[in-house]
Amino acid sequence: MGSKGQLLVISGPSGAGKGTVCKALIEKSPIWISTSCTTRKPREGEVEGVNYFFIERDEFLNRIDKEDFLEYAEVYGNFYGTPKSEVLKMLEEGKDVILEIDIQGALKIKSSYPKGIFIFIMPPSMEELRNRITNRGSETPESLKTRMECAYDEISFASKYDYAVVNDKVEDAVKKIESIIVAEKCRVFKIKDELLGRF
Ligand code: 5GP
């Protein structure tokens, strides 16, 4: 990936509010968000091509074989993957790109593309996390238990990321991410060619 745009990789436990934060961020900033493919069934209100591309397992496996995904992972028994060609095209055109993906996927990207900016969204507390997942109304008691157990595990991976943003208030979390993007654009190793050309 010899890209010009910045690649932001955002993860965090289910219910930390990654989706809401990313949505608010793309409404304010000129960032393109990648739409993943998944074999999970749509939740109430989810829209094909907006939240995900919902595809069958056979098609997903077929696309793995064709190396169509930048990364993919199995999460809670379903496959999720980032379509490769669109992301590379956007980066090449100089656009900043967000991937909202799980930790396994983020770590795969980190090993192949360390220039990415890795941001971990934290819930304000585990109690608040449980409330948010419960209020979503889409989980059975068993799947709530699984997601809470996974959340403890996932939070232990925050140290692998470059930044941790606590999502207490969405506007504050968005401001912090915007600041990270601005700061990253000033990193000398990213702009040294441009700097050398000026002086
Ligand atoms: P959900 O089912 O709640 O929409 O997503 C479950 C998990 O899958 C979340 O942690 C979400 O970030 C992650 N996820 C969504 N799309 C992708 C993807 O393309 N790749 C990977 N590795 N994880 C994804």
Image: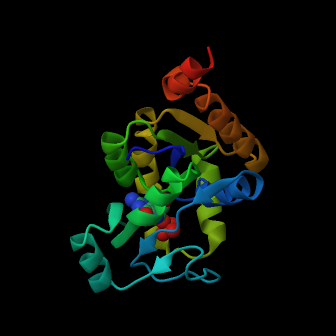
Tell me which residue sits at (27%, 85%) in the image.
Answer: 58
Coloring scheme of the render? rainbow
Instruction: Name the spot of residue 138 as percent of width and height, x first.
Output: 57, 76
Q: Residue at x 39, y 79 (%)?
A: 39
Q: Viewer-proximal residue, 153 or 66? A: 66
Q: How many marks?
A: 0
* Relative to 77, 141 lies left or right: right
Q: Is residue 12 visible?
A: no
In percent of width and height, residue 42 lies at 52, 82
Foreground of the two, 48 or 69 = 69
Q: Nearer the viewer, residue 141 or 100?
A: 100
Is residue 98 in view from this perspective?
yes
Q: In the rendered image of this protein, does residue 181 appear above or below residue 48?
A: above
User: The C terminus lies in which quarter of the figure?
Assistant: top right
User: x%, y% of residue 134?
Assistant: 61, 67
Q: Nearer the viewer, residue 163 or 150?
A: 163
At x 42%, y 47%, the residue is 154
Q: Position of residue 133 (x, y in %)?
A: 59, 64
| Picture residue at 53% right of the left edge, 63% below the top | 34
Q: Residue furthest top?
A: 199
